[in-house]
Image (cartoon, rainbow, N blue to C red):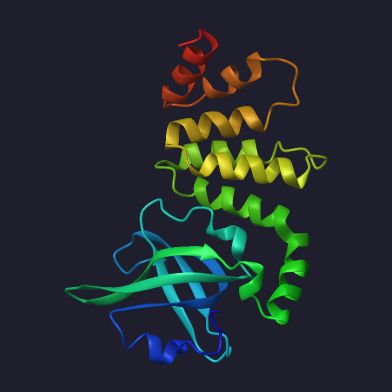
């Protein structure tokens, strides 16, 4: 059985080109690099709680990792070198199943279940920040604000998981549709999408209505 205490702490792990282990996912944040590019950063902490390490989340991978903030995850990380330095990036991860959890981690998981709703919303917010234009980001943040406070956590989680796998245009369409489902007027989604400079989400919606 995997032992959390048998693995190297992060001060030892970062001396390797690649390393695997079970670590606490402390946070996921958007940061701007020295060259001005936005990157998503996951901060992990070792079991002993002494060391932390920032891992870049490359491309559109790992968009749903926010669900596991505050929990332990199994992961593999690797170093990527470039002319002016290096950084560590996340190669893969998976949530820790109950047999691998310490009692402390299990207690933390119970506590964190109360914040599932906010985690899901934060995952959607993070995805919105990857949209190519500020106008599309603003549009989607407004759409997200239309979610009813009565919408259940399970529904929000379902929306979050569905949206993470979509390209930008379908993401905009589905977020607009899902956040206006309580409205009986089927034309609301189309009217909102027609306001965008980017007409592709509207065209996808139009084709869907026509059965294409």
The quadrant of the picture occupied by the N terminus is bottom right
Residue at the outermost front position: 1
Residue 139 lies in what quarter of the image?
top right
Q: Is residue 83 rendered to the left or right of residue 30?
A: left
**Closest to the observer, 95 or 117:** 95
Q: Is residue 49 above or below residue 92?
A: below
x and y, in percent, of residue 181 in the image = 70, 26
Residue 19 lies in what quarter of the image?
bottom left
The quadrant of the picture occupied by the C terminus is top left
Write the residue at 58% across / 88% down.
49
**Residue 30 visible:** no
x and y, in percent, of residue 103 in the image = 73, 80
**Residue 196 visible:** yes
Residue at the outermost top position: 210
Write the residue at 46% across / 70% down.
75
Q: Is residue 172 above or below residue 44?
A: above
x and y, in percent, of residue 117 in the image = 72, 53
Q: Is residue 148 above or below residue 46?
A: above
Residue 16 lies in what quarter of the image?
bottom left
Write the residue at 39% across / 91% down.
12
**Closest to the observer, 156 or 16:** 16
């Amino acid at each position: 059985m995997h032992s959390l205490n048998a693995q190297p702490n992060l001060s030892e792990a970062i001396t390797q080109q690649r390393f695997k282990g079970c670590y606490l996912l402390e946070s996921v944040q958007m940061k701007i690099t020295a060259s001005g590019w936005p990157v998503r950063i996951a901060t992990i902490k070792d079991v002993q709680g002494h060391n932390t390490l920032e891992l870049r989340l490359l491309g559109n991978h790992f968009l749903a990792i926010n669900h596991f903030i505050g929990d332990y995850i199994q992961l593999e990380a690797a170093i990527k070198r470039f002319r002016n330095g290096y950084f560590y990036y996340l190669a893969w991860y998976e949530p820790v199943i109950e047999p691998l959890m310490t009692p402390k981690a299990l207690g933390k998981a119970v506590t964190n279940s109360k914040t599932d709703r906010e985690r899901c919303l934060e995952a959607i917010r993070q995805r919105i920040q990857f949209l190519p234009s500020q106008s599309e980001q603003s549009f989607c943040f407004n759409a997200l604000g239309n979610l009813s406070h009565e919408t259940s956590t399970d529904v929000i989680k379902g929306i979050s998981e569905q949206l993470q796998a979509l390209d930008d245009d379908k993401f905009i369409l589905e977020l607009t549709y899902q956040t206006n489902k309580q409205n009986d007027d089927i034309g609301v989604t189309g009217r909102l999408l027609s306001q965008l400079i980017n007409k592709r989400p509207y065209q996808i919606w139009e084709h869907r209505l026509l059965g294409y």
